[in-house]
Amino acid sequence: MNRKAYTSMADPLTTPAAELPVRRLGPEDLDRCLALSEDRAWGPERRKWLFILENGEGYGIDAPSGELAGTVTLTRYGTTAAGIGMMLVATRYGGRGLGRRLMTHALEAAGDAVVFLWATESGRPLYEKLGFETLCVAEARVGRLRAGGDPVRSRPADPGRDLPALLALDAEVFGADRSALLARLFDFAEQVRVVEDDSGLIGYAGMWRNLNTLVIGPVVAGGEEVARALITDLARTADGPVRVEVDRTRPGLLGWLGDRGVSQAFWTSFMVHGGRPLPGDRTRLFAPLTVAMG
């Protein structure tokens, strides 16, 4: 459904936002989610939406037409942490409190977990009102990464051999159990690569296709040099532009990406509900899997 058709329906929501029912979404709602994304001028990110609906929790408010008036997603990592994403409200229902209703529902569902999200500039005021605080600003870098004669320092990951060590490393860094999600990364991603030293596995990264771009993430590494090696080795086989989300507390990595032709496309604010401390060792988390999930 195109944006013109979506916004021309004569089906106003008359129920106050606070009383609107919020229902659980599933893969069967994928086309409705894509229609809402198109209404908001987002790309038809079919693979990403399906991955989130299958591995996270989608919530939505139905419009009288049967389409979605709004969505939000929650990805739980045990009971410790949770990421909120895909918060969308149809253009014709903007300003009616649907965003607050969806966010409140997601926060209640998250329980005692530390809840985080990446906010666009338009969404940030609502999140601030709901108690989110900005920790840093992340830049979405997009471009064709130019080769620099770098030696290959990583190798393709072997799920049978590497998954236990990868999960152990990720648990240290993220501070929460992401094993269910990462076990599915090998099927979702175009590539997963790892770096080892004498102590064992010290870094891993994945690259997955989203429309015409290859997203590099997550990137977990023992230091910036390892992160650069993983990004370089993944990008060698990219048949188009790559995208990686890096926060501005890493000027060295951002400068290196800029020198290699991967420039800023837009930025988001990384926010945590209540300003609570994040679990784990985030100094080794260089890029998320996706800003919708963490």
Image: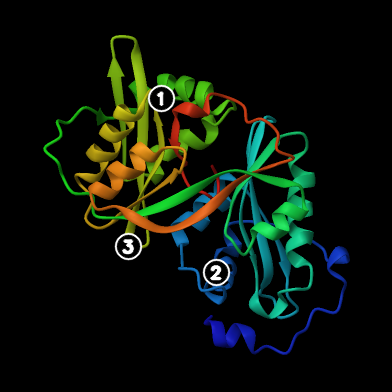
Asked which quadrant contains residue 26, the reply is: bottom right
Instruction: Give the distance between the C-alpha atoms of the residues marked 1 and 3, in whole angstroms.
Output: 28 Å
Residue 5 image position (x, y, % from top left): 58, 87
Q: Is residue 25 visible?
A: no
Looking at the image, which residue is at 23% across and 37% down? 233
In the displayed structure, 128 sits above or below 81; it is below
Mark 3 neighbour class, 10 Å CA radius: few under 14, some 14 to 19, many 20 or more: few
Query: Which numbered disc, 2 or 3, marks the residue that appears first in the sequence?
Result: 2
Query: Which residue is denoted by mark 2 in the rendering?
Result: 37
Q: Residue furthest left?
A: 149
Query: Which residue is denoted by mark 1 in the rendering?
Result: 163
Query: Which numbered disc, 1 or 3, marks the residue that appears first in the sequence?
Result: 1
Mark 1 neighbour class, 10 Å CA radius: few under 14, some 14 to 19, many 20 or more: some
In the displayed structure, 13 sits above or below 256; it is below
Task: Give the total of numbered labels.
Answer: 3
Query: Which residue is denoted by mark 3 in the rendering?
Result: 212
Q: Is residue 160 left or right of residue 259?
A: right
Looking at the image, which residue is at 69% across and 59% down? 125
Looking at the image, which residue is at 39% across and 42% down? 187
Give the image's coloring scheme.
Answer: rainbow
- Amino acid tagged 1: Leu
Local SS, label 2:
helix
Instruction: Give the distance between the C-alpha atoms of the residues marked 2 and 3, in whole angstroms.
Output: 17 Å
Disc 1 and disc 3 in contact, CB within 8 angstroms: no
Instruction: Give the distance between the C-alpha atoms of the residues marked 1 and 2, in whole angstroms.
Output: 34 Å
Disc 2 and disc 3 in contact, CB within 8 angstroms: no
Query: Which numbered disc, 1 or 2, marks the residue that appears first in the sequence?
Result: 2
